[in-house]
């Protein structure tokens, strides 16, 4: 029997004896009896003593019970070492711990016996695949699969987008047209429209400046760069190129804003060609030196009667810009914006080769025709094509085939207005989409767009070249 149990029993016996005591049956002498007041006081203190004794006994019993339970728990617990600290090193686990009862584990399934013709499985893990180390700063070789290659799905897309510009007779954009107002034909067959929107698109623009023009023309263009920067919105991205005998990229694609303005300010230092008209007579003419108008013959000298070669690689510049634009997001409207007199001579690629790239990558060409190309009579005369002097009517050919436009302006003010007109036309177009029924091929496909309303001028690409799958 524990001490707590003994105290609880003693308390119960004491309480029962006190309650069972009957003082009325006792014979106490009269002279030894207590007065009534003292008897009442004694009874009061007796009950207070009983309650105090009961409370003390219960408190001692509860304390002894708690101490006994704590001792039993400490005996059942394992000796776990304290956590390591800076002043107390890690203590090893005691080696004399009682063995714990193992938990029942499910019996593992017995592997089925391998077939007789298969060798027994080896317990050694398979060897690791070979790892190719690439030195720092070098690019991985073509035999390594990149993340894009692992998750690339190559499929052929037969969906065709056709941007369309609609203007009235005065040259203003016409809005409010509906899908039923348009008819699209591919190779003479009417197509069912699957997509239609008149919402504006952000632009990816490649601006090309011809620095092979006379210096006076280049200086005039340099004074219009503030208007050129203002023609683009903050949602557009612009890249700048220059060309004369070669093509140079001045800046990569970046958001229109302060950076574009800064680059254009640097381009104001560009200078044009100082070559004037070819010298056909006089002391320095092709007939050689003269004295008093009489040619001085030199033995074996042959007169040069051909005009000087004016190398202007416009085709190469457009091709460079088109290849860069082809890598931009398809959700943007891709345009090439050329500021030139349109002369082309000496390019490595032909017009037809460049046009195929433009039409296969959905790129539209806009141009500001300056200097001689802005004179209507001059552009007609240049169709004669002087030998070694190139062509000047190539800009309208690019613009017409891709759905763009050429703005021919002579004055600085008109050139600045033409910037905003060209970017506004490119951004605010009707966009038609259809799924072609033609079989996959790389041949050219003709496109014709018609509008049911009369008196309207339509600008759209004349056709397209399908891109191969995965391009």
Image (spheres, rainbow, N blue to C red):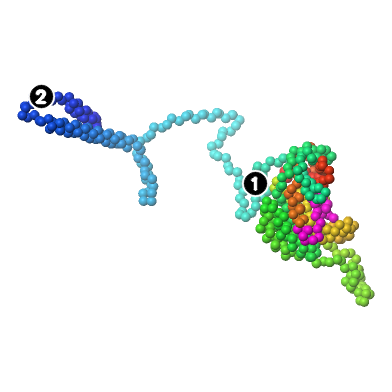
In depth, the one of 358 and 40 nearer the eye is: 40
Q: Which mark is residue 352?
A: none
Q: Residue furthest front?
A: 37
Please tell me which of labels 2 and 1 falls first in the chain.
2
Residue 32 counted in the magenta span: no
Q: Are marks 2 and 1 in contact (CB under 8 Å)?
A: no
- Crowding at dot 2, Cα within 10 Å, few <14 / some 14-19 / many 20+, comes out as few
Residue 402 counted in the magenta span: yes
Q: Residue furthest top?
A: 25
In depth, the one of 429 and 126 nearer the eye is: 429
**At which x and y percent is residue 12?**
21, 28
Q: Secondary structure at mark 2?
A: loop
Q: Residue furthest bottom?
A: 292
Gap between marks 2 and 1 measured at Cα: 112 Å
Q: Which residue is mark 2?
A: 26
Specify the quadrant that holds the N terminus: top left
Q: Secondary structure at mark 1?
A: loop
Q: Is residue 76 left or right of residue 192?
A: left
In depth, the one of 72 and 120 nearer the eye is: 72
Q: Is residue 303 visible?
A: yes
Q: Which residue is mark 1?
A: 146
**At which x and y percent is residue 403?**
79, 48
Q: Quadrant of residue 175?
A: top right
Residue at 80% from the left image edge and 67% from the top image edge: 274
Residue at 73% from the left image edge and 42% from the top image edge: 197
In depth, the one of 396 and 302 nearer the eye is: 396
Residue at 8% from the left image edge and 29% from the top image edge: 33
Residue at 77% from the left image edge and 44% from the top image edge: 162
- Crowding at dot 1, Cα within 10 Å, few <14 / some 14-19 / many 20+, comes out as few
Q: Is residue 59 left or right of residue 78?
A: left
Magenta-colored span: 393-416
**At which x and y percent is residue 306?**
89, 64
């Amino acid at each position: 029997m524990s001490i707590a149990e003994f105290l609880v029993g003693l308390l119960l016996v004491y309480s029962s004896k006190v309650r069972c005591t009957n003082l009325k049956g006792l014979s106490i002498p009269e002279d030894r009896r207590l007065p009534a007041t003292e008897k009442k006081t004694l009874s009061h203190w007796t009950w207070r003593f009983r309650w105090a004794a009961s409370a003390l006994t219960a408190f001692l019993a509860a304390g002894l019970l708690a101490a006994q339970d704590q001792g039993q728990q400490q005996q059942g617990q394992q000796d776990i070492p304290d956590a390591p600290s800076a002043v107390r090193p890690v203590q090893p686990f005691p080696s004399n711990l009682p063995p714990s009862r193992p938990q029942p584990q499910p019996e593992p399934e017995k592997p089925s016996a391998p077939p007789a013709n298969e060798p027994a499985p080896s317990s050694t893990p398979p060897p690791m695949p070979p790892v190719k180390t690439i030195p720092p700063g070098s690019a991985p070789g073509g035999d390594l699969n990149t993340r894009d290659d692992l998750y690339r799905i190559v499929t052929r897309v037969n969906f065709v987008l056709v941007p369309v510009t609609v203007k009235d007779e005065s040259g203003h954009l016409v809005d409010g047209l509906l899908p039923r107002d348009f008819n699209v034909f591919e190779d003479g067959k009417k197509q069912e429209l699957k997509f239609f929107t008149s919402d504006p698109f952000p632009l990816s623009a490649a601006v090309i400046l011809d620095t092979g023009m006379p210096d006076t023309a280049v200086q005039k263009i340099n004074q219009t760069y503030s208007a050129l920067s203002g023609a683009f919105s903050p949602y557009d991205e612009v890249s700048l190129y220059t060309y004369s005998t070669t093509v140079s990229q001045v800046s990569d694609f970046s958001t229109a804003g302060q950076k574009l303005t800064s680059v254009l300010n640097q381009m104001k230092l560009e200078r044009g060609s100082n070559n004037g008209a070819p010298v056909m007579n006089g002391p320095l003419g092709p007939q050689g030196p003269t004295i008093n108008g009489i040619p001085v013959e030199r033995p074996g000298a042959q007169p040069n009667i051909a005009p000087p070669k004016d190398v202007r690689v416009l085709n190469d510049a457009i091709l460079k810009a088109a290849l860069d634009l082809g890598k931009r997001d398809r959700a943007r409207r891709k345009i090439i914006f050329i500021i030139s007199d349109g002369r082309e001579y000496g390019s490595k690629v032909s017009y037809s080769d460049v046009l195929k790239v433009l039409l296969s990558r959905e790129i539209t060409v806009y141009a500001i025709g300056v200097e001689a190309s802005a004179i209507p009579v001059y552009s007609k005369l240049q169709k004669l094509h002087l030998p070694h002097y190139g062509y000047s009517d190539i800009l309208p050919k690019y613009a017409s085939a891709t759905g763009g436009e050429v703005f021919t302006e002579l004055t600085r003010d008109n050139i600045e207005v033409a910037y905003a007109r060209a970017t506004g036309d490119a951004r605010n177009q009707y966009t038609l989409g259809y799924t072609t029924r033609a079989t996959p091929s790389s041949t050219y496909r003709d496109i014709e767009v018609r509008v049911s309303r009369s008196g309207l001028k339509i600008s759209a690409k004349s056709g397209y070249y399908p891109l191969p799958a995965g391009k």
